């Protein structure tokens, strides 16, 4: 019972941390373009994140919980250890304003706790089953490729958008700001469908105690995670929004619109195939891609490098800590 309570708290904390670390990136472009106050932007983002969470399926949730196969008795301490490790690591890094990802930390935590619980065979290392990512390697491959795909897509969209915008009268270019609000909503919905499912899957398996997601996700579990994710986007994400909107690239409304459109497309496609992406990875890469498309000196490469270094150490660090956390939790009644 103690471990179950810790597991439930850990799953809800993952939703909160995803709200702090990943979800705020959906609002970054709006602030970068100075289209509204932080309060207005945050309220807009909150509403669409809730919508995305409520509309989400279970493909991403299934991918997350199927990374480890340790049986029902060990599944709760494994998921609890991975959750609290991801939360602790992300909390420590986001306090410094770094857009590190609780999603990446969760992958490392699941792998480490799974190894501690059942050895190498207990972890679904996987790869790709067609277009669907399977296991730790499948998710990491997707997370690794997503930034390049997002940056390339944003660069192409930016080039096309600039060719169209240059032919428009100056007065009509204000409509770009309206498009930016819509694109930001699309990113928020996409993030709700992707990030929201991660916490929902963890919560559903911990509560059921079966070690699988065969019973699906209950309505109360879906609503709880969606609301927590959205609320913490507003309550705790301002630092990350500031880092992303001002710390990576300087661009205009066209660049910001291109980045948001590319981000929404990549995240929605990932949710459709069950890939638990890092929204911070996708959005920051899209903004860099659009910035490079406009002019390379618009990108603050030192900031980009700092973020990627943080991502690189997340998986092994969380793996080691989660293994230790599992050894402690499995001794609880």
Image (spheres, rainbow, N blue to C red):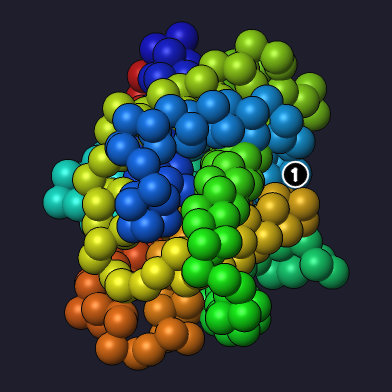
Residue drawn 55% across the image and 33% down it:
49
- Please name whichever residue, 58 or 243, is drawn nearer the observer in this view of the structure: 243
> Is residue 204 in sight in this rendering?
no
Q: Residue at x 70, y 14 (%)?
A: 219
Q: Residue furthest right?
A: 130
**Of 76 and 302, the residue lying toward us:** 302
Measured from the top left, where is residue 293 in percent x and y?
Answer: 47, 86
- The answer to whether one can see residue 173 in this image is yes
> Is residue 311 positioned above or below 77 on the image?
below
What residue is rendered at 50% in x and 69% in y? 170
Mark 1 is surrounded, within 10 Å at the Cα level, by few (under 14), some (14 to 19) or many (20 or more) other residues, namely many
Q: Which residue is mark 1?
A: 59
Q: Is residue 319 left or right of residue 306?
A: right
Decide which of 272, 179 is in the foreground and name it.
179
Q: Is residue 159 above or below residue 4?
A: below
* Image-quadrant location for residue 66: top right
Q: Is residue 53 left or right of residue 98?
A: right
- Secondary structure under tag 1 reads helix
Figure check: 200 above or below 309:
above
In percent of width and height, residue 290 lies at: 47, 77
């Amino acid at each position: 019972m103690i471990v179950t309570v810790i597991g439930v708290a850990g799953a809800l904390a993952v939703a909160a941390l995803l709200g702090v670390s990943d979800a705020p990136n959906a609002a970054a472009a709006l602030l970068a373009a100075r289209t509204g106050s932080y309060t207005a932007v945050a309220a807009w983002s909150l509403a669409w994140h809730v919508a995305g969470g409520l509309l989400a399926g279970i493909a991403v949730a299934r991918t997350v919980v199927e990374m480890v196969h340790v049986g029902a008795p060990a599944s709760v301490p494994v998921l609890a250890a991975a959750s609290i490790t991801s939360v602790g690591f992300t909390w420590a890094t986001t306090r410094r304003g770094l857009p590190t990802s609780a999603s990446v930390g969760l992958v490392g935590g699941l792998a480490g706790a799974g190894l501690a619980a059942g050895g190498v065979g207990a972890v679904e290392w996987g790869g790709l089953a067609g277009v669907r990512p399977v296991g730790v390697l499948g998710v990491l491959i997707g997370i690794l490729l997503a930034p390049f795909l997002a940056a390339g897509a944003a660069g192409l969209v930016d080039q096309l958008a600039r060719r169209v915008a240059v032919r428009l009268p100056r007065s009509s270019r204000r409509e770009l700001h309206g498009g930016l609000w819509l694109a930001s909503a699309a990113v928020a919905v996409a993030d709700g469908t992707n990030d929201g499912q991660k916490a929902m899957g963890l919560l559903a398996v911990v509560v059921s105690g079966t070690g699988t997601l065969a019973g699906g996700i209950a309505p109360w579990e879906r609503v709880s995670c969606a609301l927590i994710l959205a609320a913490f986007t507003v309550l705790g994400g301002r630092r990350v929004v500031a880092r992303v909107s001002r710390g990576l690239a300087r661009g205009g409304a066209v660049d910001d619109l291109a980045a948001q459109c590319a981000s929404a497309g990549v995240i929605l496609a990932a949710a459709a195939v069950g890939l638990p992406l890092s929204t911070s990875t996708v959005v920051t890469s899209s903004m860099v891609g659009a910035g490079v498309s406009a002019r390379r000196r618009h990108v603050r490469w030192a900031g980009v490098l700092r973020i990627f270094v943080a991502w690189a150490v997340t998986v092994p660090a969380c793996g080691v800590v989660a293994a230790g956390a599992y050894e402690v939790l499995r001794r609880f009644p």
